[in-house]
Amino acid sequence: MKKIVVLGAGESGTGAAILAKSRGIDVFVSDMGEIAPMYQALLDQHHIAWESGKHTPELILDADEVIKSPGIPLTAPLVRQLIKQGTPILSEIEFAARYTHAKMICITGSNGKTTTTSLIFDMLRRAGLDVGLAGNIGNSLALQVAQEDHAYYVIELSSFQLDNCYDFRADIAILLNITPDHLDRYDYQFQNYVDAKFRITRNQTSKDAFIYWSEDPVINREIARIRPQATLYPFGSNEQNVAYTDGSHLVVATRPEVAPLRVSLDELSLKGKHNQLNSMAAGLAAQILNIHNDVIRESLQQFTGVDHRLQYVATVKGVRYVNDSKATNVNSCWYALDSMTTPTVLILGGTDKGNDYSEIDQLVLEKCHTLIFMGKDNGKLIQHFEPMGVKYISTNRLQDAVQAAYQSANEGDTVLLSPCCASFDLFKNYEDRGEQFAKAVRSL
């Protein structure tokens, strides 16, 4: 009998193990950390052997294939040993795709993935399609394929998930943007990260669609270099694209025989330039899937956004508090600052991923009167921003950061949590960071 070992028992690993078991495969799960009780219960329910707090080499190295959690780097000692002996290592997405004939709508990019993925899912669900939400949000693709396989999947894909995809093919691939991120996982080589993102076009044919932002110089350079086989659907700020803005409306026109979609920019539920781009990408995907323009328009007008992305928390003594905890890189913080219309107190900091903070320098000077650093190590932030002359306060706890922001903000200001960094120095994940921020604000 074929043996599969799953490394990492989070959402994707547990789902992959359950799918493997449902297909009669001998499966073993190993996690160096503590497996959450809910996932332990699921593994036990499906009679899947597992270990927690260790990797036992003799139980792992004889696997025919290994499904690796995206959070485990290829440099991990056991992973290096598996690579050296030639054991195939794949992602949960790659494994799950073997067992479904569903249409795959896949979204990646440095920023905007979750919003765009959620918006497309909303459009397909409004249209009455049998659709699942997977990848970095929703239940794992593997678990859904095992228990409630859908006709369509809308999948948010990180570069880590794409790294170990080989035969997987996206019917519709969306690449929103590429800016430096996760460089600590890519030997601090930007091109390695770019190559990972472009794996979303791997195996596509002319029958498939590749939707991309036409004004991203990195994307344009790579398209010219690798020449994707899919049909191209660019979106941007002028009529040379199949989705664009004309100054007052968002327009989506995938092909001549389909009436263009026109939605007033004022009517879009998601505000800001970055969300106009997200809305264009989503509208294109929906039109390609032959969803009626009235349904797309309704979704664009009514969709409420995603948690932890420019999410209003509360107003305290005339100061608005906004949770943008999902801004785990500098470019995402740039979009958040660009959307600010009031004087701003910016809270940032966390686990640095090789960040270049100069991208937000101009917006910091234009919009921020105070910076609050929160992290175990704020040295790089202080070194970068201190010479700019903007007031800063260094803290080492989110609760202290919120208190410092409360003391620094004036009536009419906005306090913006937009960290630029990963959350793993002080928090379980960006959701935990955002929830703790909201709790601290409401206790003011």
Image (cartoon, grey):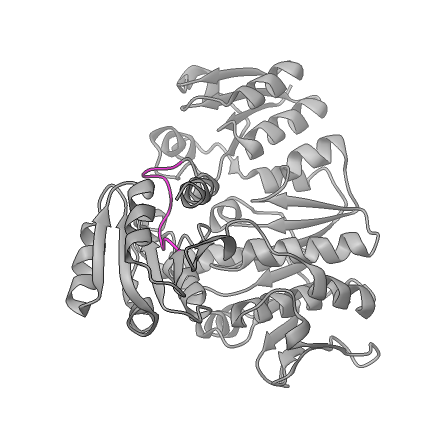
Range shown magenta: 417-427
As drawn, is 84 to the left or to the right of 285?
A: left
Along the viewing direction, whichever of 166 and 150 lies nearer the viewer: 150
Task: Using the image, determine if residue 286 lies above or below residue 376.
Answer: below
Along the viewing direction, whichever of 265 and 358 lies nearer the viewer: 265
Along the viewing direction, whichever of 341 and 191 lies nearer the viewer: 341
Percent x, y for residue 35? 48, 22
Can you name the residue that lies furthest to the front here? Answer: 317
| Quadrant of the snapshot with the C terminus | top left
Residue 294 visible in image: yes
Percent x, y for residue 247? 60, 85
| Residue occupying the point 41% across, 16% down | 56
Q: Is residue 282 magenta?
A: no
As drawn, is 242 to the left or to the right of 52?
A: right
| Residue occupying the point 49% across, 59% down | 111
| Quadrant of the snapshot with the N terminus | top right
Percent x, y for residue 283? 70, 67
As drawn, is 10 to the left or to the right of 143?
A: left
Residue 323 visible in image: no
Q: Main secondary structure of the magenta part?
A: loop
